[in-house]
Each structure stands twice: as structure tokens, then as C-alpha cells.
Image (cartoon, rainbow, N blue to C red):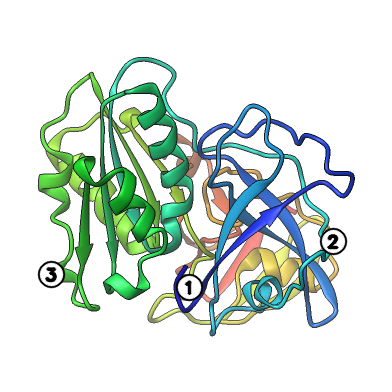
């Protein structure tokens, strides 16, 4: 594959058929980090109604928390605990032209869509960016099977040299849908250009790859949980959700990327710093905050929890 991306094939222990996986589906897999089990999401590359195995691609994140290192160290025949396929990044159910945008390892769910659309003889274009040709996972397959509908971009770490999203998206149309997966800057930039061009954001589908990183200027938060009266100190480089879990709380959550709102709690005191992609303006006016990614603009924050 590449120097830091590993392709893995996962089968049932009894070699039976697995649950169907539609394009855009992912698995939640238990990984061991410092002896503790945590769940990580990995997109399924091979969409199938009757899969004998799931194909996933795992990028080694050297500065990550250890999930990718655990997956890269697996031996042949190792056993993993996994959820069934879940999908919050589905292809629109109807005839349309698909504009597929991928950055880095975000190619994995997008490639499942490419394979499916190609088999259906449906219209699509793939726009895929990476730092270099050597760092581009699945490049040989794309050039070998989908080259006529694909445009590859290599920026060598210089954003200005990458894909021009305004040109990639083009003018909005009821017959076109965009799908984007990759790091947060790519997602933010795509949504920004789509808004500027007048796209209906219901036609822009996205999945964020990887956990959010701390932003410049983030500071610690003194968090008060109003119902229990507990005070939890949230470090500048930790999420509110992770701090709550570390303190022994049992908050509800799912994606940990600000895409589902399962973790949303009401702010009772303090000023929210919203960084999610799911809450509406009405939700925010009502005081809801996605604690997996969002923070506070004030050093103290009180939540209805």
C-alpha cells in the first residue's frame, strides 16, 4: 500500500458470511491502548451485500494515541472485537452525479463509493489529494480502474498547490451531490466553498477522518457538572468528553467527531466555543454543546449533567 498505510482483511472466525456493508459504512473496532480497550472507527473499503471479509485501510498515526499502532502490529490470525457495519455517510438514494472528494486516508469510504458507482455505471468524478504520489493509498487501483473519472492532486504540504475546491464543486445543481472525507481543514474548506457557491448543504455529505486536534489558543477549562456538583479540570489538549470519562463519569457519546450530537449537553453558565458539524443554530441558541469536540471561550463552564 504505502509506507504508513496498511490494508487489512477481516473475516469471521468461522469463515461465514458477514453482515452487508453499504458504501460509506464503517466498523467500530476494539483496540488496546496502554492495556485499556478503546473503540476506533475504520471505514469499509469493499461495499458488499454478502461479504466474506471486510477490507479496511489503517494509516499509522505516529503522534496519535496508539490505536493505529495497535492495528499495525496485529499478527495474521489475530482476533478483534467489532461492531456490525454502521453508516452515517451514505450515498444519496436516487439518480445523481456524485462529486467525490478525499484527502489522505479519507479515501477509504470514498473508494467504496467509487467502486459501487462504477459498477452501477453511474456518473461521478473522484478528486483525491495527498502530499505525494508515494503517500497516496490505493493509487495504483485508482489509476488502473478509475483513471478516466479521477483527478489526483499532490501538494507536498503546500495548501495552495492542492485541489481548487471552488472549481471541483462548481455551480450548485439539484442533480449533483458532493461527498467529502478527510482531515478537518479539507472538510471546513469544502463546506465554506459550498456555502459561497450557493450549494444546498443537504447535497453535501461528509465524514471527518480522525479525532479533532487542539486549536491554537486553547486553554484549560474548569468544568462544573450542575447535577452532581462535581468539578472537573479539562486540560488544554483534552476534550471535555474525555475529561468526563477520565473522571469516572458515564456520558453518552458515539462518533467523537462532532457529527452525531449524541454527546450534546446544555450549557448553564459560560460561553460555548462550537466546533461541531451537526447542531443547528436553534440547538445552539438553546444552549446545546457537543462535548466531544467543542470547548468554552471562558475559563469556567457549567453543564446540565
Q: Residue at x 55, y 52 (%)?
A: 289
Q: Residue at x 53, y 61 (%)?
A: 293
Q: Which mark is residue 160?
A: 3
Q: Is residue 131 above or below residue 122?
A: below
Q: Residue at 69% of width from left, 45% of height from top?
A: 53
Q: In the image as oriented, which residue stretches furthest toward the front?
A: 144
Q: Position of residue 60 (x, y in %)?
A: 55, 76
Give the spatial CA distance, label 2 vs label 1: 30 Å
Which type of secondary structure does the marked residue at label 1 adopt? loop
Helix, strand or loop under label 2: loop
The mark that comes first in sequence, 3 or 1, is 3
The reply to whether discs 2 and 1 touch (Cβ–Cβ < 8 Å) is no
- Rendered position, 229 above or below 98: below
Where is mark 1, residue-wise? 213
Q: Is residue 64 above or below residue 29?
A: below
The numbered mark at residue 79 is 2
Q: Mark 1 packing: few (<14 Cα in 10 Å), some, or many (20+)?
A: few
x, y percentage for residue 146? Answer: 29, 43
Amino acid at each position: 500500500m504505502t509506507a504508513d498505510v496498511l490494508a487489512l482483511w477481516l473475516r469471521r472466525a468461522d469463515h461465514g458470511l458477514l453482515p452487508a456493508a453499504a458504501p460509506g459504512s464503517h466498523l467500530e473496532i476494539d483496540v488496546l491502548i496502554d492495556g485499556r480497550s478503546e473503540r476506533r472507527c475504520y471505514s469499509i473499503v469493499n461495499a458488499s451485500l454478502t461479504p466474506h471479509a471486510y477490507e479496511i485501510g489503517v494509516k499509522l498515526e505516529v503522534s496519535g494515541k496508539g490505536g493505529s499502532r495497535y492495528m499495525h502490529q496485529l499478527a495474521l490470525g489475530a482476533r478483534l472485537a467489532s461492531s456490525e457495519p454502521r453508516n452515517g455517510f451514505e450515498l444519496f438514494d436516487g439518480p445523481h452525479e456524485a462529486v467525490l472528494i478525499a484527502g489522505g486516508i479519507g479515501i477509504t469510504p470514498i473508494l467504496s463509493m467509487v467502486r459501487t458507482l462504477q459498477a452501477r455505471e453511474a456518473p461521478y468524478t473522484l478528486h483525491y489529494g495527498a502530499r505525494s504520489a508515494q503517500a497516496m493509498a490505493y493509487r495504483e487501483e485508482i489509476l488502473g480502474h478509475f483513471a478516466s473519472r479521477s483527478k489526483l492532486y499532490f501538494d507536498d504540504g503546500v495548501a495552495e498547490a492542492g485541489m481548487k475546491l471552488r472549481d471541483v464543486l462548481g455551480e450548485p445543481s439539484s442533480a449533483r451531490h458532493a461527498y467529502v472525507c478527510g482531515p478537518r481543514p479539507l472538510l471546513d474548506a469544502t463546506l465554506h466553498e459550498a456555502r459561497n457557491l450557493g450549494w444546498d448543504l443537504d447535497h453535501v455529505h461528509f465524514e471527518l477522518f480522525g479525532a479533532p486536534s487542539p486549536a491554537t489558543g486553547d486553554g484549560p477549562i474548569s468544568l462544573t457538572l450542575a447535577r452532581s456538583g462535581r468539578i472537573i479540570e479539562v486540560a488544554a489538549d483534552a476534550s471535555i468528553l474525555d475529561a468526563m470519562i477520565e473522571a469516572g463519569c458515564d456520558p453518552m457519546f458515539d462518533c467523537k467527531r462532532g457529527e452525531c450530537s449524541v454527546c450534546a449537553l446544555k450549557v448553564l453558565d459560560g460561553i460555548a466555543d462550537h466546533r461541531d458539524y451537526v447542531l443547528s443554530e436553534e440547538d445552539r441558541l438553546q444552549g446545546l454543546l457537543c462535548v466531544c469536540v467543542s470547548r468554552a471561550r471562558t475559563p469556567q463552564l457549567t453543564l446540565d449533567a
